Image: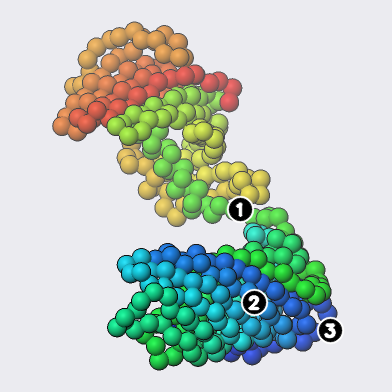
C-alpha cells in the first residue's frame, strides 16, 4: 500500500537526519557494520502471497554503498544507491482473474549495523543489519482473465519501498526477512506488497574495527545488601518460624552456649514446604544484653547474630554479606519494633488452656510434656511444652477452618555453641 511506502520514507528520512552527527577519528572505530563504502550487495528474495488468492514473486536487488556515518559512535549507518526488481503473478480466489507483474525501482537505501557493541548478549545482535529503501518505480502489469467492467490493474509509475532485516551468517552472506511494496499512481490497483525471505551476498572488504576498551569493575568491598534489607529479612524469618510456636517468648530458659534446632512444616491447598531454624544463646554480657545466633534454612541457610537487651529490644544484627564476604553490623533505628510483645506470656495466663500431661517422642528424643490446646473461630492450636527444653517448645500443631496446617517439632538440643 502507499501507506507502507510513506512509512518507509519516514524511516529513511529519520535515519538521514540522525546521521547528521558524524565522528572523525584517526583511530579505528569500535562500532561498525558489515559494509564499507564501495561495497556491492546482491540480493534475491522470494514471496508467496495468500491474500485473497495465491501468488508468487521473485525480487532481485543490487546496491552500491557510497558512505558511512556513526551517530554518537553508538551504531553505524551505511547509505547506498541501487535498484530493486520484481517479477511474479497473482490469482484471485473469488474470481477467475489475476495478473502478472514486472517492476523495477531505483532506490536510496540505509542500513543500521551493530558490530562492536561489546556488551553482554551483543554477540547475538552484532550480525544484525536493519535496512530500508525507497524510490520511484515503474510496474508493467498484465491482467489475466475477463475483467469485464471491473477496474483492472494497470501499468505505470508509482512508489516502491523495501525494508527488513539481514542477519549475517558469514562475513559475506546474510539471510534476509523483508517486506516490499510496488504501486502505481492513479489506479485502484493497490499494488504488489508482501513479505518474503531471501539471501544477500556482500562483495568487497569488510570494515575493520578496533578493540573496545574494556572497563574492569572492581570487586565490591562494601556490603551488597543494605543493612535495612537484611534486618527486615531477619525479622520476617524470625516471626515466620517462631510466632507459631505459641506464647512462650521467654528466653531465660536458655543457658549460655545452649540452643535448639527445630523444623516447621506447612501445608495448604496450593503449596507445602518446610524450613529449619536454629536459635542459640552465644553470650550473656555484663550489662544483661545477650548475643544470639539464628540460622534459617529454607533450601539455602542464612545466618544472623543478634544483640538483644533485657527488655527484648533488638539492638544490633550481624550477617555475612554474600557480595563481599564481610561480616556487616547493622543498628536498627528503633530497637523495639521487631517484637510483637515486650514480655513473655506468664504461665498463669495460659493455664486455662492446659489439657494435661503427655509423653511424646520427636526427633530430639522422648519428653514428658504439658499439653495446651486453644481454639477459636480462626485457628485450632496445640502445644507440647517441657521445662527441660530451652524455649520450652517440643511440638506444636495448628490448623485453620480452611484445612491449612502448620506443624513444628524439636530436632536437636544444642550445647557448646
Q: For the residues marked 2 and 1, what is the alpha-carbon distance in whole angstroms?
A: 58 Å
Q: Is residue 136 above or below residue 343?
A: below
Q: Is residue 177 above or below residue 248?
A: below
State the SS at label 2.
Answer: strand
Mark 1 / mark 3, whichever is N-terminal: 3
Give the colour scheme shown. Answer: rainbow
Q: Can you tell which mark lies on residue 223?
A: 1
Quarter holding residue 115:
bottom right
Q: Quadrant of residue 253?
A: top left
Q: Is residue 250 left or right of residue 228?
A: left
Marks 1/3: CA–CA distance: 43 Å
Up the image or down, 215 lies above or below 375; here it is below
Position of residue 62 in the picture relative to residue 230 (left or right): right
Say whether disc 2 or disc 1 marks the residue closer to the N-terminus: 2
Q: Residues within 10 Å of mark 2 (few under 14, many from 20)?
A: some
From the image, tell me which residue sits under label 2. 61
Check disc 3 and report the residue beneath it. 26
Disc 3 is placed on an element classified as: loop
Q: Is residue 384 above or below residue 12?
A: above
Please report whichever mark, 2 or 3, sits nearer to the chain's N-terminal start. 3
| Tag 2–tag 3 contact (CB < 8 Å) | no
* Residue 335 visible at all: yes
Q: Are marks 2 and 1 in contact (CB under 8 Å)?
A: no
Residue 352 drawn at (x, y percent): 18, 22
Q: Residue at x 41, y 30 (%)?
A: 273
- Identify the disc placed on residue 52: none
Nearest to the eye among marks 2 and 1: give it: 2
Amino acid at each position: 500500500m502507499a501507506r507502507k511506502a510513506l512509512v518507509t520514507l519516514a524511516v529513511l528520512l529519520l535515519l538521514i537526519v540522525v546521521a547528521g552527527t558524524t565522528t572523525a577519528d584517526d583511530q579505528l572505530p569500535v562500532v561498525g557494520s558489515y559494509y564499507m563504502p564501495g561495497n556491492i550487495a546482491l540480493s534475491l528474495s522470494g514471496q508467496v502471497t495468500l491474500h485473497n488468492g495465491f501468488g508468487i514473486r521473485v525480487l532481485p536487488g543490487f546496491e552500491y554503498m557510497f558512505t558511512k556515518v556513526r551517530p554518537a559512535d553508538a551504531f553505524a549507518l551505511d547509505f547506498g544507491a541501487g535498484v530493486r526488481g520484481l517479477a511474479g503473478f497473482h490469482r484471485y480466489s473469488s474470481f477467475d482473474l489475476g495478473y502478472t507483474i514486472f517492476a523495477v525501482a531505483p532506490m536510496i537505501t540505509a542500513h543500521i549495523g551493530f558490530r562492536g557493541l561489546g556488551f553482554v548478549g551483543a554477540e547475538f545482535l552484532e550480525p544484525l543489519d536493519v535496512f530500508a529503501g525507497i524510490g520511484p518505480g515503474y510496474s508493467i502489469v498484465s491482467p489475466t482473465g475477463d475483467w469485464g467492467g471491473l477496474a483492472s490493474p494497470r501499468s505505470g509509475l508509482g512508489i516502491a519501498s523495501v525494508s527488513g532485516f539481514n542477519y549475517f551468517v558469514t562475513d559475506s552472506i546474510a539471510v534476509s526477512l523483508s517486506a516490499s511494496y510496488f504501486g502505481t499512481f492513479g489506479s485502484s490497483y493497490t499494488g504488489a506488497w508482501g513479505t518474503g525471505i531471501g539471501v544477500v551476498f556482500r562483495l568487497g572488504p569488510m570494515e575493520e574495527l578496533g578493540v573496545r576498551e574494556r572497563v574492569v569493575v572492581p570487586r565490591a568491598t562494601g556490603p551488597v545488601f543494605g543493612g535495612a534489607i537484611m534486618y527486615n529479612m531477619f525479622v520476617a524469618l524470625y516471626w515466620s518460624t517462631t510466632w507459631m510456636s505459641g506464647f512462650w517468648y521467654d528466653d531465660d530458659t536458655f543457658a549460655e552456649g545452649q540452643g535448639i534446632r527445630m523444623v516447621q512444616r506447612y501445608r495448604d491447598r496450593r503449596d507445602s514446604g518446610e524450613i529449619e531454624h536454629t536459635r542459640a544463646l552465644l553470650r550473656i554480657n555484663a550489662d544483661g544484653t545477650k548475643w544470639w545466633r539464628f540460622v534459617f534454612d529454607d533450601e539455602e541457610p542464612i545466618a544472623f547474630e543478634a544483640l538483644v537487651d533485657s527488655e527484648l529490644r533488638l539492638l544490633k544484627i550481624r550477617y555475612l554479606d554474600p557480595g563481599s564476604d564481610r561480616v556487616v553490623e547493622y543498628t536498627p533505628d528503633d530497637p523495639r519494633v521487631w517484637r510483637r510483645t515486650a514480655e513473655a506470656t506468664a504461665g498463669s495466663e495460659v493455664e486455662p488452656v492446659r489439657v494435661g500431661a503427655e509423653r511424646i517422642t520427636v526427633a530430639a528424643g522422648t519428653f514428658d510434656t504439658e499439653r495446651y490446646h486453644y481454639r477459636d473461630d480462626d485457628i485450632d492450636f496445640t502445644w507440647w511444652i517441657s521445662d527441660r527444653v530451652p524455649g520450652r517448645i517440643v511440638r506444636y500443631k495448628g490448623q485453620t477452618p480452611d484445612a491449612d496446617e502448620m506443624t513444628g517439632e524439636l530436632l536437636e538440643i544444642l550445647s557448646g555453641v
